[in-house]
Amino acid sequence: MKKLFVVLSALTLSTAVSACSDHHEENMGQRDMNSNQGEIEHREHMNKMTEYYFNKMDTNHDGYVSKKEYDVYMRKMFKQADTNHDGMLTLEEIKAQKMREKEEMKSYMESNQNR
């Protein structure tokens, strides 16, 4: 169970880091021209990503993520990633899940752009 928790935590963090990295690369030119504006945008992007994951985990919408909610979320992520249903994740399955999460997050960010 500890290994599952570690793998799923790494998967979630990997997706978040990747999204940040992509956002960072897209905005490098702008940051060079206006460092403060780029930092503000980066901070706003990070806040939206944090909100995205928090809202996915806080299923009862009480403003907190309990250990149970976190565990349920991580199990769900594992189940979604394990596309061949063998109870183990391959690198390919993790990469595919990461891409699905990235697209979902992108859609979330675009729909909440004016917030």
Image (cartoon, rainbow, N blue to C red):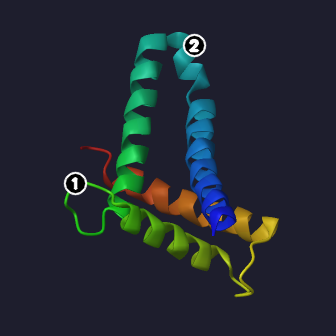
Q: In the picture, which quadrant includes the C terminus?
A: top left
Quadrant of the rendering where the N terminus is positioned: bottom right
Q: From what the image shows, is residue 25 above or below residue 101?
A: above
Numbered tag placed on residue 63 in the rendering? 1
Q: In the picture shown, does residue 89 fall above or below 13? A: below
Kind of residue at badge 2: Asp
* Numbered disc 1: secondary structure: loop
Residue 43 spot, x, y in % from top left: 41, 29
Farthest residue, direction bottom: 85
Q: Earlier in the sequence, mark 1 or mark 2?
A: 2
Provide the residue designation for mark 2.
Answer: 32
Measuring from the top left, give residue 106's x and y in whole percent. 48, 54
> In the drawing, does residue 114 fall left or right of residue 10?
left
At x 37%, y 38%, the residue is: 47
Out of 42 and 50, give the one closest to the viewer.
50
Q: Secondary structure at mark 2?
A: helix
Q: Pinpoint residue 29: horizontal percent, then vertical percent.
A: 59, 21
Residue 107, quarter of the rendered image: bottom left
